[in-house]
């Protein structure tokens, strides 16, 4: 009888067979996550990727990063998360988008000459967090410490140490920087 895995996350031995570009220590990737281009995905230390997350394209995750269930990262033009970042459940990050104006065809199966795709690197600086059900558009930077509430449409850069809400996002208020002193107290850092 085949043995049943003792955990829902890949073991260290199994991680080595996934074909990731790089990965660090204490990495937990759900067996139910989809890594569509593992050779383009780098994962730092102390990272957890939950069930049904989908990662595609050039993705770089720093250390102490958490991707919740049903997160989708479409990294054709790159998605980089620095240390201490998180993306809450059902959020989607796009680094490219089709032109929906009707002047070109849409979709990955259409010949590229008939499409008009634009995009840019999406960059999450350290200590950033997306709330649940967010959508982030190509070329956006979440500056250090920026966070969003639930149900945000992030189509512009988020200023450092702010809390943003809404569709499209707008700054609600400034955020405290206490987390920076907590990192200095962490015995593992």
Image (cartoon, rainbow, N blue to C red):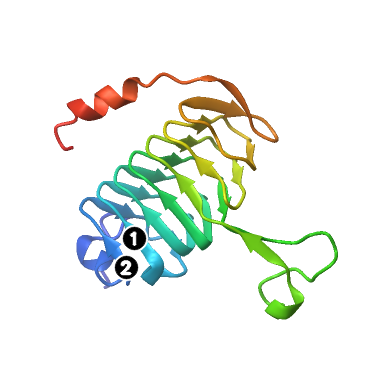
According to the picture, the residue beneath numbered tag 1 turns out to be 42
Residue 89 visible in the displayed image: no
In this image, 184 relative to 72: left or right?
left
Residue at the far left: name it.
Answer: 187
How busy is the neighbourhood of tag 2: few (under 14 within 10 Å), some, or many (20 plus)? some
Figure quadrant of residue 60: bottom left
Secondary structure found at label 2: loop
Q: Nearer the viewer, residue 64 or 142?
A: 142
In the picture, the quarter occupied by the C terminus is top left
Q: Residue at x 66, y 62 (%)?
A: 118
Q: Position of residue 176 (x, y in %)?
A: 41, 18
Question: Is residue 73 or residue 173 the one in the foreground?
Answer: 173
Residue at (52, 43) in percent of width and height = 141
- Residue at image position (72%, 79%) is 113
Q: Closer to the N terminus: mark 2 or mark 1?
A: 2
The reply to whether callout 2 and callout 1 are in contact (CB within 8 Å) is yes
**Residue 121 visible in the picture:** yes
Using residue 134 as the reference point, say whether residue 56 is left or right of it: left
- Relative to 23, residue 40 above or below: below
Q: Quadrant of residue 39?
A: bottom left
- Residue carrying label 2: 21
Taking depth in this image into account, of 65 and 158 the one nearest to the observer is: 158
> Where in the figure is residue 33, as x and y percent of width and height?
43, 59
Image vertical order of residue 52 relative to residue 179, above or below: below
- Residue 13 x/y as whole percent: 20, 66
Label 2 vs label 1: CA separation?
5 Å
Q: Position of residue 45 (x, y in %)?
A: 25, 49
Callout 1: SS: strand
The residue lying at 24 percent from left, 68 percent from top is: 16
């Amino acid at each position: 009888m085949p043995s049943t895995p003792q955990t829902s996350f890949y073991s260290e031995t199994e991680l080595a067979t996934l074909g990731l570009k790089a990965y660090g220590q204490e990495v937990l990737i759900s067996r139910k996550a989809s890594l569509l281009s593992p050779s383009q995905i780098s994962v730092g230390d102390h990272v957890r990727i939950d069930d049904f997350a989908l990662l595609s394209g050039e993705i770089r995750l720093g250390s102490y990063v958490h991707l919740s269930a049903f997160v989708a990262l479409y990294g054709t033009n790159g998605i980089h998360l620095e240390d201490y970042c998180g993306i809450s459940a059902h959020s989607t990050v796009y680094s490219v988008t089709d032109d929906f104006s009707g002047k070109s065809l849409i979709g990955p199966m259409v010949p590229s000459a008939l499409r008009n795709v634009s995009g840019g690197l999406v960059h999450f600086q350290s200590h950033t967090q997306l709330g649940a059900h967010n959508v982030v558009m190509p070329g956006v930077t979440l500056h250090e410490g920026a966070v969003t509430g639930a149900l945000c449409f992030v189509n512009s850069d988020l200023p450092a140490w702010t809390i943003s809400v809404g569709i499209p996002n707008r700054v609600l208020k400034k955020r405290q920087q206490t987390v920076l002193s907590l990192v200095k107290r962490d015995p593992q850092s």
